[in-house]
Amino acid sequence: MKKWLVLILATLVLESCGSGGSKNQSDSKSEDPMEKSYQVRLMTVDPGHFHAALVQKKMYDQVSPEVHVYAPEGPDYMQHIERINSYNNRSADPTEWNEVIYAGPDFLERMLEDRPGNVVVLSGNNRKKAEYILKSINAGFSVLADKPMIIYPEDYLKLEQAFFMAEDKGILLYDIMTERYEVTTILQKMLSLNEEIFGKLVTGTKEEPAVSKISVHHFSKIVSGSPLLRPAWFFDVEQQGEGIVDVTTHLVDLIQWECFPEQILYPSDINMVEAKRWATVISREQFRGVTGLDEFPDYLQKDVKNGKLSVFANGEMTYQIKGIWAKVSVTWNYQAPPGGGDTHYSVMHGTGCDLVIKQGAEEGYLPTLYIENIKGKNFSDFTLRLQEVLTALPYDSIKAETIDDNAVKISIPSKYRITHEEHFGQVTEKFLEYMKTGRLPEWEISGMLTKYFTTTGALKKAKE
């Protein structure tokens, strides 16, 4: 009875915020006959992270507007529904999602029993992801999961089992790799495949890797126009995962995607050489600012010293992938400098030049691609040929701007500057393309397994 009372109260609160619909399970039985024509019906499970809502920031032709949400009682799913409501009620291009909510301690079992959809969306407590994935796949549901799919080395075998099971059942398991859709990263990859410009990727060394990816994130940020309120468990590395297995998922993925495009990769291709981890210290006032809570919960007391919380959100790894030296690093600060935000640095060293993405104050915190350290070529001839190559790419008005006598900045029109939040819609569209064909490319599956072998292997190495 309690779970249904919470559900009804949640619905009343959400309806008072405007139209945009949420309803409880008992209301969903009057189904529109047209519903049967939708190829995909989403079931959102335990949406504790705001990425779950970003999947629904736009509508998709083949996806039913009725989405079933199964979650434990508490503020996490309420915030999720409020975000969906904000998309439904916005003045420009509003969505038309209808959320059907079930809140209770048996939410996962209830989802598996009700079976109102065919695709499970996961974005929340990472400690539970492996269980959610395995049980969803075993029940015959495809899964679209936010990163990371796993945060512990011991969960790797469960993930491997889930992929084998998905293939046997003819369903899909896919993670949300938004950074593949950032325009400077796309151009970096395209230019790295042009031997006339880039040459070939060097092997590199441990001290000077062939490819490096460095990411800086912030606990306090604005999402969908509002200050982000994070759940307290986000600061518990036993639930969210340490930084070395969280954001690094994106960076390891980009190294595989750019350096070995559409190639089959295996865990045996990885040699983890060294890894380290360190903490970001959060004061009680800062914690209150991003969670709304006055005190650290009991489960965080293990990480509290002298009234401050230490979060192992930072990590770095140096490894070889198919003999190529690579370095990945992630840092979490509390808040970005004025006018700033999350930043990304990436470099690929080629025999012909270096392809570098910077996103610092000098770039106005906008990802910017540079061609540097041009080797063995007349600079004027190189820039002319570079512009010809850029003109031939499927992007118009991209230009090469000379900075000095050995460096070029790539000027990108604003129309190609898609926001991070919009990337979630692009990933979902790619997933829906795969749903149409009924299978993932083999390189995607092997790449995901190799990626999580790398990140969890780095955690293991860092703790040695």
Image: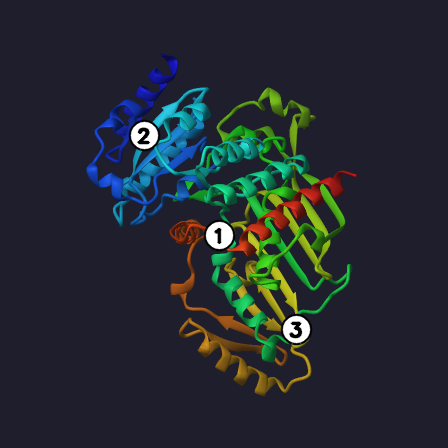
Query: For this view, does 153 lie left or right of residue 425?
Result: right
**Residue at image location 41% in from the left, 68% down from the top:** 413
Which quadrant holds the N terminus? top left
Percent coordinates x, y for residue 87 in the rendering = 32, 42
The type of residue carrying mark 2 is Val
Q: Which residue is mark 3?
A: 200
**Residue at image location 55% in from the left, 49% down from the top:** 337
Q: Which residue is mark 1?
A: 440
Percent coordinates x, y for residue 143 in the rendering = 46, 40
Q: Nearer the viewer, residue 30 or 2?
A: 30
Q: Residues within 10 Å of mark 1 (few under 14, many from 20)?
A: some
Q: Which residue is mark 2?
A: 100
Q: Nearer the viewer, mark 3 or mark 1?
A: 1
The type of residue carrying mark 3 is Lys
Q: Secondary structure at mark 1?
A: loop
**Residue at image location 41% in from the left, 28% down from the top:** 111
Pick whichever of labels 2 and 3 is earlier in the sequence: 2
Query: For this view, does 351 lie left or right of residue 247?
Result: right
Q: Nearer the viewer, mark 1 or mark 2?
A: 1
Whether pointer 2 and pointer 3 mark residues with C-beta atoms closer than 8 Å, the reply is no
Q: Residues within 10 Å of mark 2 (few under 14, many from 20)?
A: many
The type of residue carrying mark 1 is Leu
Q: Secondary structure at mark 3?
A: loop
Q: Nearer the viewer, residue 15 or 204?
A: 204
User: What colour-coding does the image apply?
Assistant: rainbow
